[in-house]
Image: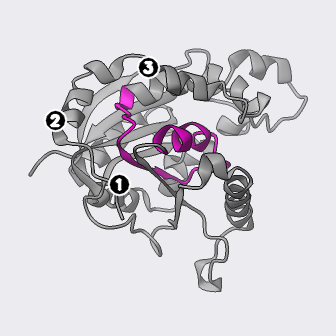
Amino acid sequence: MFKPLISFAVLAASLAGTAQAETNPSLQALTQGEHRSEANVARNLYRHPVETLEFFGLHPHMRVIELWPGSGWYTEILAPYLKPEGEFVAAGFELNPPAEANSPAYRVRIGKGYEEKLAASPELYDQVQVIAFDPPRKASLGIEATADMVLTFRNLHNWAKDGQLETVFRSAWEVLTPGGVFGVVEHRGFPGIDLATGYMDEAEVIALAEKVGFRLAAKSEVNANAKDSKDHPKGVWTLPPSLRLGEQDRAKYLAIGESDRMTLKFYKPEI
């Protein structure tokens, strides 16, 4: 059974940047929690989780869906934060996809690793709801208008390369309640940049979201990185944490840090 959705008034307040914009001590504590590895905590420097989630207007009573949570970096923060009063849904990879799905082996591996992570710490993750999300074959995020917020971190390029980005945006639109927030963080390139680099053009992302029906509430530079020239030999994966070139120019890429990222806050208007 769904917990009550947060009221439109509270969502409107978060969009306006009122009380929800203040630092939440429990959220801050979770980013530094003992349940997180040293490597994951170290990435707070580049991913700015508190500032990012507060910019999106996260509230402890919300029903939040994270698309393709990967190894669970943000799940470590979102799941325990929402557990007492809200709901957290992970829309991830299938553990046993049918042959016709043609799912890459790495996606299955990530999915199994994620499930194992949840099972290993029930005190944190026993309330997490996991659903399969593999557009276009599995594109539903659940019952229409039952989520307050949908979030995705550094995934858009994958769906764009598969020709499924509009499908994903429409799935987010359908599951969100009027006033609901669609929060996006993605590697930011320049107009015309090759998707194979992992970067995307911010203007194109905004245009597609607006085509689906979303409205842009605000943009943030909290995850910007002016040192990122976006012309690396292995695309965005040249930079940390991937460092695809190994020891070659390692110090150079560590000095640059993680990629320059767009941080976009959309909302579903009342119709």
- The answer to which image quadrant residue 206 occupies is top left
Bounds of the magenta segment = 55-83
Q: Earlier in the sequence, mark 1 or mark 3?
A: 1
Which one is in front, 241 or 246?
Answer: 241
Which one is in front, 241 or 250?
Answer: 241
Mark 2, other Cα within 10 Å: few <14 / some 14–19 / many ≥20? few
Q: Which residue is mark 1?
A: 169
Question: Can residue 93 be found in the magenta stretch?
Answer: no
Image quarter (top left, top right, bottom left or bottom right) of the N terminus: bottom left
Secondary structure beneath dot 2 equals: helix
Amino acid at circle 3: Glu
Would you say the residues marked 1 and 2 are in contact, meaning their CB atoms lie under 8 Å apart? Answer: no
Q: CA distance from mark 1 to mark 2?
A: 24 Å
The x and y percentages for residue 261 are: 51, 29
What residue appears at the point 46 percent right and 42 percent down from the top-left corner?
A: 82
- The answer to which image quadrant residue 114 occupies is bottom right
Q: Earlier in the sequence, mark 2 or mark 3?
A: 2
Q: In the picture provided, is 112 more to the left or to the right than 134?
A: right
The x and y percentages for residue 177 are: 23, 52
The x and y percentages for residue 5 are: 27, 50
Mark 1, other Cα within 10 Å: few <14 / some 14–19 / many ≥20? many
Q: Is residue 223 visible?
A: no
Label of residue 9 in the image: 2
Amino acid at circle 1: Phe
Mark 3, other Cα within 10 Å: few <14 / some 14–19 / many ≥20? few
Amino acid at circle 2: Ala
Q: Nearer the viewer, mark 2 or mark 3?
A: 2
